[in-house]
Amino acid sequence: MRITCTRDAVVQYKTDHFELFLQFVFVVFVCLGFTSCKGENPSVAIHFSPDGSTIAYTYADRIDLPLPPEVPTVYSSVYLQWCPAAQLKSYRSMKIDSYGKSYGSFVQNQFGLLFSPDSRHIAVKSPRYLEVVDLESQTRHRLTNPDELVTSMGWLGNKEMVYVIHKKTGAGKHGADSTRQIFRHTIGESPEKRLLLYEQFDYRGNYHDHVSPTGEYVVFMSQGYSDGIFYLLNVQTGKVVTFSEKKAQCQAVSWKPDGASVFCLSSKEAMLLYPKEGRIKDLSDNYDNDFRRHLAFAPEIDPQWTPDGRFIVINSTGMGGSLVCPDPWRVVPTGKLLVEYLEEKENQRVYRDPPDSYPILYVQPYPGWVRIWLCLVTDNKPTMRGETVVLERRNYLVDYEGQKFIPMKPSFSPGGAWTLTPDGKKMVYFDRSIFLEEEPVHFPGNNQQSVP
């Protein structure tokens, strides 16, 4: 069974294995036979600078083949694109990297963007390099060497970066061994002049490294071949301490935007660490009661809290999107509350697969609201052979308490390809290409109507 998208609806229909095979063979033949068969794919996220004046994102111009990870792609280039938030069409573009060795390895090591605190520079993490781009002069400074995989990064002020790299040192029976190195690097200086803060041998490429938003601390876990414990590095002093007692597997680390606390989740415990105070709050019982005992797999947890620092963002298929206030502990099941409202108050039928699942949420730069993207089952009659139902896609803005729900348009941009501006006055989204569009937004309570 497959979901096929049109502009305003999603049509579900059945396709047998033979038809899928023929479609696959046709696509491979066409794309390999004509080198101009390229697709422009927008970034998975739209990034705003700290002062809200600039928007940045990456996009890839690539051969778009439905191939497994071990099959090489023919060619792809990835570009950084940015523009003033008030002039979306006045954009600048810069080629960041090219790849083609393995589509799978590219996907596993996604690109990352991070603005400097003064909004004048942006760090770009590719599968091969970490570079800093001066947005005004368009000059670029490469911070790492080709054999170094950057797994986490953060700005320490406006002229320094803290980042973690892994260097492959061998291949054993359990996979590739690597060395974890944590650096402090002044922008403009060569990699040879950077300061090594910490070095540790690890196994199997355990990339559990998380630089704080302020660049002052790094939380990481060394698991070896099985379980491990959490470590905390103080960037200013270089001191490394452990703060977990039970050996386990790392499942998530999520920083508060100001770096004052960090939520750490392993397969055996949950805790809230206050690094400057050296204090730890055990949240294991709270987390187990609300999440672990109800989920077959660990949920997805955003690496940062909501922009106002109030909630941790936890997404799972079984429970949907939830906002969690860690201290004192409180859970708002946002995705579930929206589904209940639509089905019980609006008499809508929300499409869920599996039937006991709920939609996930996407954090917005504008505090107080999150976005949920879902599909509603319509009364429209199927028009194609094999169709079962016709689905209508919807975007909803939901307040942090799960009490206010605003349907939004456009409805065709899932994930981070649709976002509110930091001031909450507009929404910005991709127009089915690599370019951005915007629409005004009016929230209730201001004697204005919400966007239909």
Image (cartoon, rainbow, N blue to C red):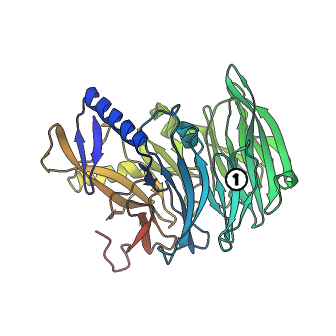
- Look at 57% across and 61% down and name the residue there: 80
Residue under circle 1?
130
Which quarter of the picture shows residue 23?
Answer: top left
Is residue 434 visible in the rendered image? The answer is yes
In the image, farthest residue toward the bottom: 447
Where is residue 193 shown, x and y percent of the image? Answer: 87, 54
Residue 314 sits above or below residue 448 on the image: above
Residue 400 sits above or below residue 283 on the image: below
Crowdedness near tag 1: few (<14), some (14–19) or many (≥20) residues, C-alpha within 10 Å: many
Which quarter of the picture shows residue 346?
Answer: bottom left
Considering the image in quadrants, where does the C terminus appear?
Answer: bottom left
As shown in the figure, which amino acid type bears the numbered disc 1?
A: Leu
Q: Secondary structure at mark 1?
A: strand
Closer to the camera in the image, 294 or 192: 192
- Look at 49% across and 32% down and name the residue there: 297
Considering the image in quadrants, where does the N terminus appear?
Answer: top left
Where is residue 237 shown, x and y percent of the image? Answer: 87, 53
Where is residue 239 shown, x and y percent of the image? Answer: 86, 47
Residue 34 sits above or below residue 158 on the image: above
